Image (cartoon, rainbow, N blue to C red):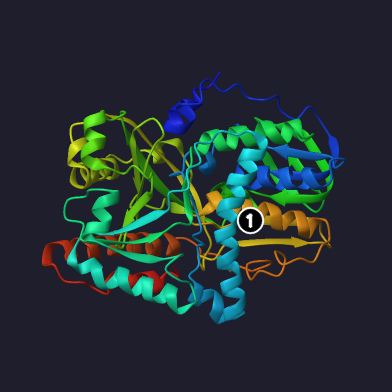
Amino acid sequence: MDDYGRYSLWLDSVGDIEPRPPLPGDVTADVAIVGAGYTGLWTAYYLLKEQPSLRVVILEKEVAGFGASGRNGGWCSALFAAPLSKIAKRYGRERAIALQREMFHTVDEVGRALDEEGIDAHFNKGGTLTLVTSPTQLDRVKAELDEEHSWGFSDEDFRWLDGAELSDRIRIPGAIAARFTPHCARIHPALLVRGLADTVERLGAKIYERSAVTEIGDRVVRTGHGSVRADVIVRATEGYTAKLPSLKRELLPLYSLMVATEPLSTQAWADIGWDGYETLHDGRHLLIYAQRTADGRIAIGGRGAPYHFGSRIEDSFDHDPGVFAALRGQIAELFPAAADAKVTHEWGGCLGVPRDWFSSVGFDKLSGRAWAGGYVGDGVSTTNLAGRTLRDLILGRETDLTRLPWVNHEWRSWEPEPLRWIGVNAGLKAMAHADNVELRTGKPTRRGELVKRLIGM
């Protein structure tokens, strides 16, 4: 049995994972789903809750939760990959606002579904704090708050915390303020995905693991173990989409890495606070993200690992000593009480990035092909919305969900190599440089924002 626990703290903490049997040969189904991560499992879940008689087959190369669903930062947030201004420019203001409000609702829907199915994924809706950890971040984070209010959202959705209010929640040296939203829950990623897999099996789905898909056609999926013919084929492969030869430039696999400490002492938590279990990041250009786990660890992640030429995906890319060292440094800087805590886990994984950084869900009735993805790291909740939307699209229903602006949104392909390798890595380096310049000079720079616009963020 493979040691799947080596791929993340989350997978390590669920115990030994025994792969389900592979596809036994050629089979037929009503719906075939490629990928046993959040997207595929939520889609199966909502379809079977609505129509229990459906024959649903899920194919997975490794085991349920092997990819981003078992390795992410554990933020079930209301974040959507594309900003409201970008959505509104293409689809209109009202539809952009409708999508954001549905994202708010989705956080609660995940909690409701977990309660109904008895899945203990450590769901705790404590919200998110965007820290202002330097004067250079102040105007940027305040501008983000003003932008959110300009769309009609109130302080109940996004509000400012001054230094005193922030310290009542968490004590971070040098943090002068924060933006707060209640629309986020801390979760244990692997408990969610593994529990969801067990649930959809109980509802009647067939999950075949160790069954790598080699080709997705119209109403057929082919593997080395046989083929599945179905009226509907759902592609739920996210960062691993590049592994399919015909979709090499569809989604770019970008790596995000994490570390986690040992459980901290009672005294350390008394010094830090963080009793509300808010998820946490700050106003820098190159993202970091953190949570306080249910067993008292600090789990923190960040971008900065390079994009690998040709959209390659390898286990060795999960480990970048430079990024891990930077994350350990962030723990010591943000949480001095945890500076001497042992880091017990270091891991990484790839997420799926479309060329316009705009998630999409859709269904082509003529070919029977459906898809969802391009979450750019904001998929814990968006996958749930994708599952409910695919349910309605596949069942031929016209609903508020099928009218949301990300439905049938079309991506253009990423540039061929070496252009995408040069462009993406230059962008990552430029944003890291912008953070370093701000830290060194104490003055804001527009370079990071300009680079984001250039590469489509």
Q: Nearer the viewer, residue 153 or 342?
A: 153
Q: Is residue 115 above or below residue 25?
A: below
The residue beneath circle 1 is 385
Position of residue 358 measured from the top left corner of the image (x, y, whole percent):
54, 66
Q: Nearer the viewer, residue 360 or 102?
A: 102
Q: Is residue 230 above or below residue 2?
A: below
State the residue at coordinates (42%, 31%). 9
State the residue at coordinates (43%, 75%). 149
State the residue at coordinates (59%, 67%). 99
State the residue at coordinates (62%, 75%). 95
Position of residue 274 measured from the top left corner of the image (x, y, whole percent):
31, 44
On the question of residue 377 being in view, the answer is no
Position of residue 270 measured from the top left corner of the image (x, y, whole percent):
24, 37
Q: Nearer the viewer, residue 235 or 85?
A: 85
Q: Name which quarter of the figure residue 368 lies in.
A: bottom right
In this picture, residue 230 sits left or right of residue 174: right
Q: Is residue 145 above or below residue 206?
A: below
Which amino acid, mark 1?
Leu
